[in-house]
Image (cartoon, rainbow, N blue to C red):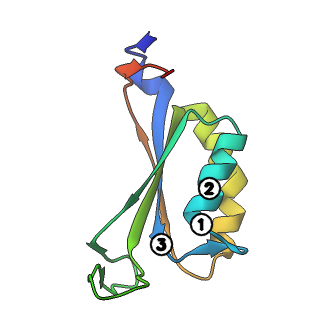
Amino acid sequence: MTTKKQSSDYSILKVHASTTDKIGSKLLYQHLVELARDKGINGATVFRGIMGYGASSTIHSSRFWELTEKLPVVIEFVDKTEKLDGFYKEIEEELLRMPKGCLVTLEPTEILLQKKGN
């Protein structure tokens, strides 16, 4: 069990994109989460939004009658800042080559508790 780590040492890397964005034949969020796991990143979570827009200013929203939806998605990774910087450098070219837009941010964070489960 780990408690309260130095905030300047850890960060959250966030990739804002769309649920329909792909890298090759894989969905972007699936590709990035699997790659992060393979690279030993501490944790990753994918959040799907119900409404949003990006630089294109096109608003996308969830409607219960639509079978396939283009919705906002945020993929978050938490680890040491140095490790996330390296991970971003590895994925930057792939993100730049995507035909659709995205936004990537890096925010310092403070880890209050990190406990592994059974």
The numbered disc on residue 28 is 1
Q: Which residue is mark 3?
A: 19
The residue that appears at 72% across and 52% down in the rendered structure is: 90
Percent of width and height locating residue 58:
34, 87
Q: Please tell me whether mark 3 sits on a helix, a strand or a loop.
A: loop
Q: Is residue 16 above or below residue 85?
A: below
Q: Is residue 71 left or right of residue 99?
A: left
Q: CA distance from mark 2 to mark 3?
A: 13 Å
> Can you tell which mark lies on residue 38?
none
The residue that label 2 is drawn on is 32
- Which residue type carries mark 1? Leu
Which of pointers 3 and 1 lies earlier in the amino acid sequence? 3
Q: Position of residue 113 (x, y in %)?
A: 37, 19
> How far apart are the alpha carbons under marks 1 and 2?
6 Å
Amino acid identity at mark 3: Thr
Give yes or no for contact between labels 1 and 2 (Cβ–Cβ under 8 Å): yes
Disc nearer the start of the sequence (2/3): 3
Q: Amino acid at mark 2?
A: Leu
* Residue at (32% x, 66% y) in the render: 49
Taking the spot 59% from the left edge, 40% from the top edge, the residue there is: 84
Residue placed most toward the observer, 7 or 51:
51
Q: How many marks?
A: 3
| Circle 1 SS class | helix
SS label for mark 2: helix
Determine crowd level at label 2: few under 14, some 14-19, many 20+ residues with C-alpha closer than 10 A.
many
Q: What is the x, y in percent for residue 74? A: 42, 59
Q: Position of residue 86 (x, y in %)?
A: 67, 42
> Does residue 6 lie above or below 73 as drawn?
above
